[in-house]
């Protein structure tokens, strides 16, 4: 268990192993290092593994201002440089963490990636969505005035997703930036060999998104865990590690 100051933010991370290529584990929104600990312990025999709490999660400090995915990516870049980690590491990421891995791979490169329940492709938005958004923004503006201000929090809580409602302060504004990030246009320029793992019943990031990513990425393959959801990698931890073993075997430090 370690902590390091990166760009003025206290970052908590765990390190497993001390040989072979560098692997970085990137958790999903609202999660922390515990969700990916078993992966790090499994890979420690053959790799040097870094398991990070993103700013605002786990034991890491919140950023002072709302972060975008690009801010998270640059903070990760600073972390990599500070600890002399491979500039093109292996990323194993879940959900929100996949957005950061994709941005990093696009700008700085990655050796390989395993993206599970990958977020980053926004839904097609129809008239109903834009009407709802406009109504919310209008209501927010009206309720920010005078005696109606006390009802603003209730409006925000009623209108947002569960992740939005569970966030507060700077992390709520961060969530808005993050969910509006779309990586679709980056995927075609990412050459890293990539394994996509999706649960067939994933409602947060449906398997159709995985199929789109597989089609757009030059060196991607999709594995589907049947009858499982957004946390398929965690529910079927042993199976996920076997998939990792097959994907990374040629890179093992033996």
Image (cartoon, rainbow, N blue to C red):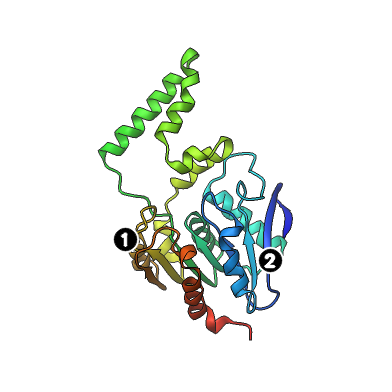
Vertical position of residue 196 compared to residue 251: above or below: above
Q: Nearer the viewer, residue 133 or 108?
A: 133
Sequence-first tag of 1 and 2: 2
- Disc 2 element: strand
Q: In the rendered image, which quarter contains the N terminus?
A: bottom right
Picture coordinates of residue 218 (x, y %)?
40, 71
Cβ atoms at labels 1 and 2 below 8 Å apart: no
46 lies left or right of 175: right
Name which quarter of the figure residue 161 lies in. top left
Taking the image as shown, residue 242 lies to the left or right of residue 139, namely right
What residue is at 57 percent from the left and 44 percent from the top?
A: 67
Mark 1 surroundings within 10 Å by alpha-carbon count, few (fewer than 14), some (14 through 19), many (20 or more) = few
Q: Could you say where residue 158 lies in the image, as x and y percent from the top left? A: 41, 32
Q: Is residue 210 left or right of residue 233?
A: left
Q: CA distance from mark 1 to mark 2?
A: 34 Å
The answer, for residue 144, to whether it is visible in the render is no
Please tell me which residue lies in front, 194 or 242: 242
Instruction: Tell me the number on the disc at residue 57.
Output: none
Q: Work out which residue is located at the far bottom of the displayed protein and give it.
A: 254
Quickly name the residue at label 1.
208
Can you tell which quarter of the image residue 32 is in?
bottom right
Residue 91 x, y percent position in the rendering: 55, 66
Secondary structure under tag 1 reads helix
User: Can you see residue 232?
Assistant: yes
Q: Badge 2: how crowded within 10 Å, few (<14), some, or many (20+)?
A: some
Q: Nearer the viewer, residue 240 or 134?
A: 240
Q: Position of residue 51 (x, y in %)?
A: 62, 62
* Residue that label 2 marks: 15
Above or below 56: residue 142: above
């Amino acid at each position: 268990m370690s902590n390091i100051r990166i760009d003025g933010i206290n970052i908590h991370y765990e390190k497993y192993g001390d040989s072979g290529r560098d692997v970085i584990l990137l958790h999903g929104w609202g999660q922390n290092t515990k969700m990916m600990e078993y992966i790090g312990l499994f890979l420690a025999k053959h790799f040097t593994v870094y398991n990070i709490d993103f700013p605002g999660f786990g034991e890491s400090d919140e950023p002072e201002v709302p972060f975008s995915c690009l801010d998270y990516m640059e903070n990760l870049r600073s972390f990599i440089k500070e600890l002399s980690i491979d500039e093109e590491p292996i990323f194993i990421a879940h959900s929100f963490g996949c957005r950061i891995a994709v941005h990093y791979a696009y700008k700085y490169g990655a050796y390989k990636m395993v993206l599970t329940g990958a977020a980053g492709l926004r839904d097609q938005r129809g008239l109903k969505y834009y009407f709802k958004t406009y109504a919310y923004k209008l209501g927010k503006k009206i309720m920010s005035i005078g005696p109606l201000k006390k009802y603003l929090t209730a409006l925000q809580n009623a209108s947002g997703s569960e992740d939005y409602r569970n966030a507060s302060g700077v992390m709520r504004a961060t969530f808005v930036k993050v969910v509006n990030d779309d990586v679709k246009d980056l995927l075609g320029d990412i050459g890293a060999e990539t394994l996509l793992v999706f649960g067939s019943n994933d409602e947060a990031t449906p398997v159709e998104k995985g199929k789109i990513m597989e089609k757009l990425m030059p060196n991607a393959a999709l594995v589907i865990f049947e009858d499982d959801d957004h946390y398929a990698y965690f529910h079927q931890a042993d199976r996920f590690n076997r998939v990792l073993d097959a994907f990374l075997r040629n890179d093992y430090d033996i």
